[in-house]
């Protein structure tokens, strides 16, 4: 299941990259335009977050922090706690005043001046820190010399709309994962027939090729056919890779002489899993895909053990 998921992620990034490379313009190398698209998607996802964060926001504080002087006069603040009504005391405490009890420290409270209707209970409020002698005049255990003049309506926390930033972020994440995974997926290992007989002179087996030969890139979608053969001139044995195109066979490329340095494994793609051999030389870096495991094992028999 995990392998199939990796295959689909890699295939999606591969198809997007292939489509982008068909568009005229610069940066047409493998993954170059794909990473440019990823950067653009991340920028698009960041725009609503940055715009939201740049909007003026009340500072999140508590009554204890206001008492400690962490919120200066005129600061726009947001508080949460239990709101309690204060009784009207003639010539001392007029109507419209409440207290907010700090949930983290029930002994710490601050006086509120409501600009409109207010109800008691646990809630979130926003307002401006002001200077006032009422807390001390009322003889209450409140933050001395400070009250919060409440906004007519609490200013809600500004959260970026997920529909604006989640989709481009998810798409960018899928493309990043797919690009890092690659397509198709080569996994070394698997059972190998150690009794398989290696290729002999003038014998060839068919294969498909993906990877790099010189400056040429071969993708799985190219369905590049090839043959692997052996020649034994006077100078010694050479294992050759010959591409087969519409115009016939191309000049052979040396896979190894006298043996092949490679890694045996399997290639996973949307078409399924195929036995394969990875060969890396200074002039090429290819994966050879075989229709049959015995054909792969005959090439593997020519590798040093």
Image (cartoon, rainbow, N blue to C red):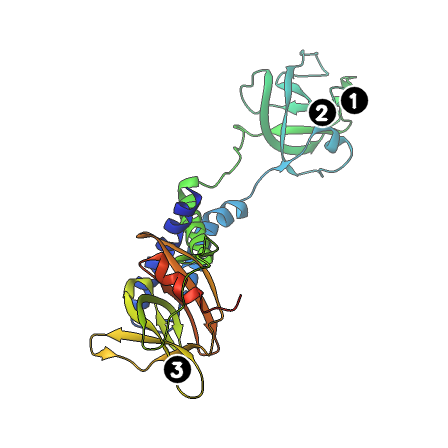
Q: SS for tag 1?
A: helix
- Asked if residue 201 is positioned above or below residue 54 in the image, the reply reads below
Q: Which residue is mark 3?
A: 232
Identify the residue under disc 1: 136
Give neighbour class at mark 1: few <14, some 14-19, many 20+ (Cα, 10 Å): some
* Residue 168 higher or lower than 143, as above or below: below
The answer to whether any part of residue 36 appears in the image is no
Tell me the SS state at disc 2: loop
Residue 104, located in which quarter of the rendered image?
A: top right
First in residue order: circle 1 vs circle 3: 1
Q: Which mark is residue 104?
A: 2
The image quadrant of residue 28 is bottom left
Q: Earlier in the sequence, mark 1 or mark 2?
A: 2
Nearer to us of marks 3 and 2 is 3
Instruction: Indicate the position of residue 288 as horizontal and vertical percent values.
Output: 37, 65
Residue at position x 39%, y 82% in the image: 232
Label 3: state its secondary structure. loop
Inspect this view and state whether residue 207 appears.
Answer: yes
Q: Who is closer to the viewer here, 250 or 111?
A: 250
The one nearer the camera, 75 or 270, is 270
Q: Please give the name of the residue rendered at 56% of the width and 16% of the height, measured from the top-left corner.
A: 119
Foreground residue, 234 or 95?
234
How many C-alpha atoms fall within 10 Å of the one at disc 2: few (<14), some, or many (≥20)? few
Lower position in the chain sequence, tag 3 or tag 2: 2
Mark nearest the camera among 1 and 2 is: 2
Q: Position of residue 251 (x, y in %)?
A: 32, 82
């Amino acid at each position: 299941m995990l392998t199939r998921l990796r295959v689909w992620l890699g295939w999606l990034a591969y198809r997007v990259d292939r489509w982008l490379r068909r568009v005229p313009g610069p940066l047409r190398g493998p993954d170059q335009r794909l990473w440019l698209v990823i950067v653009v998607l991340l920028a698009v996802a960041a725009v609503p977050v940055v715009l939201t964060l740049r909007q003026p926001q009340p500072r999140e504080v508590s009554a204890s922090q206001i008492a400690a002087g962490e919120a200066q006069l005129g600061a726009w603040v947001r508080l949460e706690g239990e709101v309690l009504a204060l009784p009207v005391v003639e010539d001392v405490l007029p109507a419209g005043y409440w207290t907010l009890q700090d949930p983290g420290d029930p002994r710490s409270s601050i006086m509120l001046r409501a600009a409109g209707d207010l109800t008691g209970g646990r809630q979130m409020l926003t307002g401006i820190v002001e200077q006032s002698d009422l807390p001390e005049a009322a003889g209450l255990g409140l933050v001395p010399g400070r009250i919060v003049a409440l906004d007519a309506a609490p200013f809600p926390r500004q959260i970026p709309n997920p529909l604006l930033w989640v989709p481009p972020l998810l798409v960018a994440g899928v493309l990043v994962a797919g690009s890092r995974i690659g397509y198709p997926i080569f996994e070394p290992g698997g059972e190998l027939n150690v009794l398989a007989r290696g290729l002999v002179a003038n014998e060839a087996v068919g294969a498909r090729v993906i990877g790099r030969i010189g400056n040429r890139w071969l993708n799985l979608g190219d369905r590049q056919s090839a043959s692997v053969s052996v020649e034994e001139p006077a100078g010694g044995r050479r294992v050759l890779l010959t591409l087969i195109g519409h115009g016939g066979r191309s000049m052979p490329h040396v896979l190894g002489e006298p043996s092949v340095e490679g890694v045996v494994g399997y290639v996973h793609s949307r078409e399924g899993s195929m036995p394969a051999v990875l060969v890396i030389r200074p002039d090429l870096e290819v994966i050879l895909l075989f229709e049959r495991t015995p054909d792969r094992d005959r090439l593997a028999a020519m590798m040093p053990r």
